[in-house]
Amino acid sequence: MKRRTMTLILGTLLAGAAGAQSADPNGTVTFVTTADPTFNPWSPNAFVESNLINELLFPGLTRWDKDLKPVPDLATSWKASADGLKWTFNLRKNVKWSDGQPLTADDVAFTFNDLVLKKELGANQGSTWRNSVTKVNVVNPSTVEFILSRPWASLPTYLAYYAGILPKHSFQGVTDPWKFTAFNKQNPVSSGPFKISQVVSGATVRMVRNDNYWGGKPKLQGVTFKVVPDSNAQLAQLLSGDVDLIAIGNPETVDRVKSSPNLAIDIATANIYYFVALNQDDARFQDARVRQALLYAINRPAMISSVLKGYGQVATGPIAPIQKTYYNASVQQYPYDPAKAKALLAQAGWRPGPDGTLMKDGKPFVISMPTASYQQLVPISLLVQQYWKDIGVKAEIKTMDWNSYIQQVIVKRDYQASAAWWSTPADPDVLPYYDSSAANVGNNIPNYKNPKLDTLLENGRKASSQLARRVVYNEAQALMAKELPYLYLWYPQSITAYNKRVQGMRGITQAADFQYANEWFVTK
Amino acid sequence: MLGFLVRRLGQGVLVLVLISLITFFLINLAPGGPSAASRFETTAEERAALTKQLGLDQPLVSRYGQWAGGVVQGNFGVTLNGGQPIGPILRQRLGNTAQLGLSALLLSVVIGIPLGILTAMRRNSVLDHVVNAITTLGMSIPDFWTGIMAILLFSVVWKVLPSSGLYDASAGFSAVGWLQHMILPAGVLAFVMLPNLVRFTRSSLLEVLGMDYLRTARAKGLREQRVIGKHALRNAFVPIVAMVGLILPALLSGSVIIESVFGLPGMGRLAVDAALGRDYNTIMAVTLVAGAVVIVTNLLVDLTYSLVDPRIRHD
């Protein structure tokens, strides 16, 4: 979820944009990160501060192209068996780790069998992988087989999603991979276009070009990440020229950036959607009319104007418009309509009490709504509270810090409504967030259970052709828009501010751009 | 004197044990858990595995026992959110905070005490009123705002100083480079500390200046500088030394904000990050070290009294 912060599109940083300008052969760029990174994409200690850095260090078998489709990276080709339970990946030959050792099928098998699929390790995204992948077999040094327990059409996409391959030889004799400080925090052996040269805890991570990189010599001499937790300090560093690129969290600062001649702004979308989850363990929310009413009551365009300063688009479901192939806009819509909201609630048996609060069976419609003082969650919750108040529904907001919020909402599921967001791979497979089996224990935050949706999402995983998948996911989107497992708020646009001297980024999403870092350069 | 030292050190150890007990049980009773096991997308299965790995499935008392046993052997354990040994991190962060804190203290003392003396000697003059206004400002304005304004002016508008971060000595140490990085954070922190020191010095000296023995000194024909420098300051310095002793812990707490604003990796930021991430082991280590610093500082201040005023004896 926190990946959202760093998942941006750099639409105008196109490789050709500086065609007429010459690249500085000794050029370096400086980015920011919010905390000391963990150089291991699978470590539970690797959060948003580590994701992009890990992409520079540890390529996956696949990466994204401009349409966010998986294309070759460490794997050159792949093929699924007829029953969809075995995927064979042919690996790129002559790929070397930064220490000169060859990268082989053993490394791929080690990464998955010994880290990701080991239940007791609790690796990042481990559940998602264990849900479908049983094991990875080495066929020969340049071929691996993924053995699946159930079909998973999205496997190549997920292999591009922070799924870097790690060097088996570095982990020889290591009993606890998450406490392998020499690797995770100091100087890992890597295979990406850049490698670590120096880490100063709390201050900087310096990377230099990796001459062993399979994709050719990177155009930049190095990349530095400065650890700057405070967003105001990040902006100050960008304005003073100390850093080259930051993600803008507060849209109000955009004008300040625009006034600087050296800087440019890029606006884009990613596969992110904000929502209000209504806990389905609460009988009141099991009535779809109530869920629909609560969404009709929210003026989402107005919220986008006020909270996001216009940088967003009303959401219709979990598949964002960035997934052009699969996004289905022809689903039930919920324009701001308090009258309709009241009518639906009346149908569901909710009538205004003496003080205007809706009542049913002698009980007022009061919703406990915990939220975290993190990014824009508090203002979002306050606005939702106001809109619901207008139709006679009382929301009681309790603000807490992030970790307390996680414990209350995610671990204990002790909430009735809560605003949050999902950031997922650009793939229509949203099973982990909606499947009945993920209620209470997984990523199905509202604990929504619908056998029809389960079947559709399972069929989506089985569908082998793009057309078949489209059919399934169009139907799934229509069902989700009608049923509202989550109250969909908006697809936010990401704002990136950067120094114009940085060139060569492909302009996909930031996560995708970092998979082509060897192409970046700075102008002289 | 030796008896005094042993007694005070014994009391210090007892205080540290109490601090560790209270802190350990308080942070473990607080809602939320370590970030490593508190991700939005972590499933129940992953959380169970991580909780076991971190030893959080053990009873609290046995966890405290393990932690205390490690500390007695000089081992603070590893961070819960990262699995790094805490000792080296503490050393590095303490060094950075010491650079910031001592620089700020030096600035505060070098500027604050002379200003306090001057304003006491020229009571109700223009200088006194101006300094009074500035110190009132310093006490009123929050340090994070002062920090952000300093960055805005010196780094963004005038571009004369780095906006934040630590001096990078990897290419060789340069005093100028170090100063450039340290002057803003230390200056802002000193600006926060200064008002107390100026006002305290002023009032302490004013109190002494009204005493009979100084009138006698003046009556004997001693020059004013000698009256102030030799006779008045000596007595006024005892409370001033106490004040400096009080400033040191305040510098530690002030560094929390300043280090965050200026992106300095010190103890303050470590404490904040550890608290937010519920990194119990790191919180314990930081609390213990901060407690030890305060205890040792107070002891040093008490010992300094006898140097300033020989009548004070620690028997």
Image (cartoon, coloured by chain):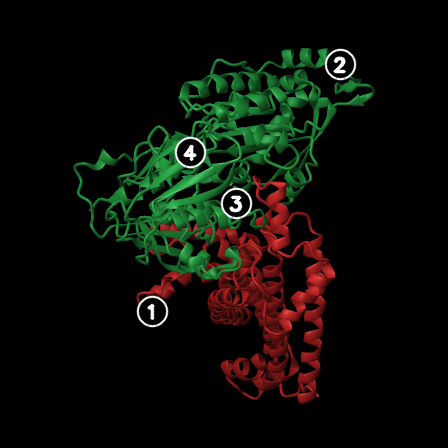
Q: What residue type is labelled 2?
A: Gly
Query: What residue sits right under mark 3 in the picture?
Result: A117
Q: Identify the residue under disc 2.
A: A349
Subunit under mark 4: A
What residue sits right under mark 1 in the picture?
B173
Establish whether labels 4 and 3 are both on one chain: yes
Q: Is mark 4 on a helix, strand or loop?
A: helix
Say which element carries label 2. Answer: loop
Name the kind of residue labelled 3 in the image.
Leu
Q: What element carries label 3?
A: loop
In this view, the residue in front, B7 or A196, is A196
Tell me if mark 1 has few (under 14), some (14-19) or many (20+) residues whose alpha carbon lies within 10 angstroms of its own.
few
Contact, mark 4 vs mark 2 (Cβ under 8 Å): no
Shown in red, the chain is B
Q: Which mark is residue A157?
A: 4
Horizontally, residue A412 falls left or right of residue A32, namely right
Cα distance in 3D space between marks 4 and 2: 45 Å
